[in-house]
Image (spheres, grey):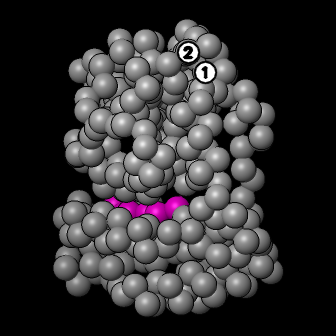
Amino acid sequence: MPDIAFANGVFLPLAEATVSVEDRGFQFGDGVYELLRVYGRVPFCPLDHLARLERSARALDIALPFDTARWMSVITEAVHRSDYPEAKVYIQVTRGVAPRDHTYSATLVPTVIITVRALASPVESLYTDGTDVVTVPDLRWGRCDIKSVSLLANVLAKQQARNAGAFEALFVRDGFILEGATSNVMTVHGGSLVTPPEGPLLLSGVTRRLALQLAREAGISLAERPLPEKDLYAASEVFLTGTTIEILPVITINGRCIGGGFPGPITKELMARFRKLHA
Ligand code: PLP
């Protein structure tokens, strides 16, 4: 039984899992989610993802129905049942099922869906040769730090990137780069790592935090400061961070070459250190 779902309290093949048409996740995008990665059958940084899930849910006034121990036991069992050595685990929690009405009752029972599927990592050449990204206007709301299932602006941005033959779209708001549609972004200027600071306009990425920690350990100076779009093109290196992509070099932005047009030394150093975290 490889593709697994945990839905409405039971494990079953993913293809058999269903949710009500009156689920508020379907009606309003009223819910939160997490994606965590499994390496060698072991979930990676699960407590960081669960802590963020808790923060996201609290910000939306959704009471998570499980404590950490229960989440861990369900995730572990789902991973075990799927038996994929390399997998991605989605946790989705919506406010629950109710007749359609924007307002909600505090008595709703949240819907919990967990799915486990095999993970197809980006092809290795993206890491050795680097990727292309485009910039797009940020059409999202003002709480991008909440990992909400309402992802319309991200969906449209990512599709815009794909249509342009690029891997990722970077959101620009008021002239500043914030993050990608599915990743955080970091640049290197004069040998220092620069990344936009955490706040309501970007997601506090688990991989972002790890990359910053690895940079500190490697003695690389770093600054979390606003990043004007115009400064991007002057960067010697740019890379993306995210759960499925890990640390992924960027070599062009809107068709303009970054650095020498190949992954730079700081990016490569952090990529190598990151891979050791789960080797
Ligand atoms: N920013 C956005 C908008 C994302 O959707 C994601 C991941 O899905 C990230 C950043 C990276 O976060 P993480 O490293 O926790 O996967």
In the displayed orientation, state which residue is furthest to the top.
256
Kind of residue indicated by mark 2: Gly
Q: Is residue 54 left or right of residue 262?
A: left
Query: Where the N terminus falls, by quadrant?
Result: bottom right
Residue at x-position 64% and y-position 15%: 261
Point out which mark residue 31 bears.
none
Residue in front for this viewpoint, 16 or 254: 254
Secondary-structure class at tag 2: loop
Label 2 neighbour load within 10 Å: few <14, some 14-19, many 20+:
some
Q: Where does the image place residue 259, in percent across and percent down from the top left?
A: 56, 15
Residue in front for this viewpoint, 261 or 15: 261
Image quarter of residue 22: bottom left
Residue named by callout 2: 259
Residue at x-position 43% and y-position 26%: 191
Secondary-structure class at tag 1: strand
Residue named by callout 1: 251
Query: Where the C terminus falls, by quadrant?
Result: bottom right
Q: Where does the image place residue 272, in percent across and percent down from the top left?
A: 64, 47
* Magenta region, residue range: 27-35
Q: In this view, does 233 lie to the left or right of 36?
A: left
Residue in front for this viewpoint, 101 or 265: 265
Kind of residue indicated by mark 1: Ile
